[in-house]
Image (cartoon, rainbow, N blue to C red):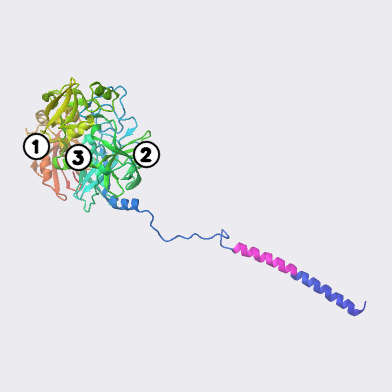
Amino acid sequence: MSIFDKLRSQKLLSFTLVLFTLSIGIVIGTLISSGVKAAKDPSPAPGATALQIPSPVELSTTFSQIAKQVEPSVVNISTTYLPKAPTRSRGNRRPQVMPNSPNNDDDDQDQGQGQGGMDEFLYRFFGNPFGGGGGATPDMPQQHRGEALGSGVVVDRAGYILTNNHVVDKADRIQVKFPGDPTEYDAKVVGVDAPTDLAVIRVEGKHDMVPAKIGNSDAVQVGDWAVAIGSPFGFQETVTAGIISATARDIPGGDSSQFQHFLQTDAAINPGNSGGPLLNARGEVIGINTAIASRSGGYQGIGFALPVNMAAKVYNDIIKNGKVTRGGIGVSFTPSDNPGATALLKANGVTEGAFVQSVAPGGPAEKAGIKDGDIILSINGKPIRDGNHLIDIVTETPIGTPLNLTVLHDGKRENHSVVVGDLAQIFPDRFGGSNDNSANKQEETAASFGMSIQNLTPAQRENLGLKETAGVKVVEVEPNSFAEDVGLEPNDILTEINHKPVNSVDDVSRLKATLKPGDAVAFRVMRKSGNGRNADWVSTFVAGILPNNAK
């Protein structure tokens, strides 16, 4: 091989080696570069596309508009019950749960007055926040102060609020909280109507209250939208929606079932909703939420609201007279849903009418000559379908109005003129005083300044060494009240307010009426200086500045 061939071979080999080396380097560099690039890539989801939020577009605004319109009118009501000894329940008081009595065989109704109990899973409730089926009830023995919650709806700018009677019944203190306002305002009971489970309360000192718009519950139909607003479990301004499931739903419920022909709804209603409004699609109040049917105590799709037409009538009577007065004629009848009712009518050759089970002694019906076993066929010439129809007519008739009743007696038609009387006087055990607000007024007086007081008997005065007409006894002092703040104590004998003598409970009420928030109030009391029977009575003064919310 010539020298030139050797040189040529060497150059080719060198070129090949260099080319191979460069190729290896490029491959390695590419791999390293790719790895570094991948390590430095900030995206945790390669290939993903960011989500874009579209511009706001209003969909159906019906419910949101209802909520904005009505929420300012719906209030949260909190009630306080002080410990009390067990007492017998008043005739028409609403217990939290009203079960059927398994041994109740009385099928009579007094002018529509239903006997028997409510279904075992029908609840009328208000409740502790986050609690179970309801709050404390004042007829139950308690070791500590009880608190509970309900709802209400403002119906007048002057501070009048419509709610359920069972929300405020026997409460020692009622406080109302408005949406967007952290202040809790004290409220007073204006009047109650136990047969419809309604109450009117009033808040003073709150400005710019917004009353809800009242609708007409007679226009409500099955399938209509229904919206409930309230404070279930303490969650204020809760809005739920559903439909009207039934109208004029009658529920066996003791002495007042004939006055409660409910609207049934599947809008969610829970403890704390009681007293809040049920609304139509126009945001008008069509009912006051009152009860649910439930096996658990919570929502199961069956809620009941008292129609607002009945609620408005009760409200108007209360603000005008302080109570609701209903007419009565003094008969008890066999209810139409009793299997024997139809048989009793057919046995007398008729298909409609109210079969008189019994007649109240001394009542208008007895005076007019109506007897047990008669069938009331018509009133003033208008046919009577059944006992509930009879009640609807009679209770709406002014007291003292004569009615012409056509009755079937021993197979013969007779006419009787019956003068409508006061239902509470005809049946005092069941209705006497149930609508009267005098008891509430008495409790309000006794709770002046946040204390419960009572007049002293002559014997008590003598034992205390007091003058014949001097002083009242402090029985109880409400927690967080003005009386507690200034240092009044149970068993104190209150003898003066601002140096004016106190001789009775009425004096306390009269003197309090002359005071306004910001006034200084000085109480002179006699108090035992020690323990035991031989402790001395000493005179002392306690004083304070009357706050805005003092009772």
In which quadrant will I find the C terminus? top left
**Amino acid type, mark 3:** Val
Residue 34 percent location from the top left of the image = 65, 64
* Up-down relation of residue 42 to residue 551 (above or below): below
Instruction: State the residue position of label 2.
Output: 301
Q: Is residue 158 toward the left or the right of residue 130 in the image?
A: left
- Foreground mark, 1 or 3, reads 3
**Could you say which is closer to the camera, residue 285 or residue 366?**
366
Q: Residues within 10 Å of mark 3 (few under 14, many from 20)?
A: many
**Amino acid type, mark 1:** Asn
Q: Is residue 527 toward the left or the right of residue 83 in the image?
A: left
The residue most toward the left is: 468
**Amino acid type, mark 2:** Gly
Residue in the image at 71% along x and 66% along y = 28
Q: Is residue 80 toward the left or the right of residue 40 in the image?
A: left
- Write the start and end of the magenta stretch as one range: 23-40
Disc 1 + disc 3, Cβ < 8 Å: no
Would residue 25 be counted in the magenta stretch? Answer: yes
Instruction: State the residue position of label 3.
Output: 314
In which quadrant will I find the N terminus? bottom right
Name which of mark 3 and mark 2 comes first in the sequence.
2
Residue 13 percent location from the top left of the image = 83, 73
Give me the C-alpha separation between circle 1 and circle 3: 37 Å
Q: Kindly tell me whether residue 16 is visible in this rendering.
A: yes
Please identify the quarter of the rendering in which residue 291 is found. Answer: top left
- Classify mark 3: helix, strand or loop: helix
* Up-down relation of residue 266 to residue 91 (above or below): below
Q: Residues within 10 Å of mark 1 (few under 14, many from 20)?
A: some
Instruction: State the residue position of label 1.
Output: 503
Name which of mark 1 and mark 3 comes first in the sequence.
3
Residue 136 is labelled as: none
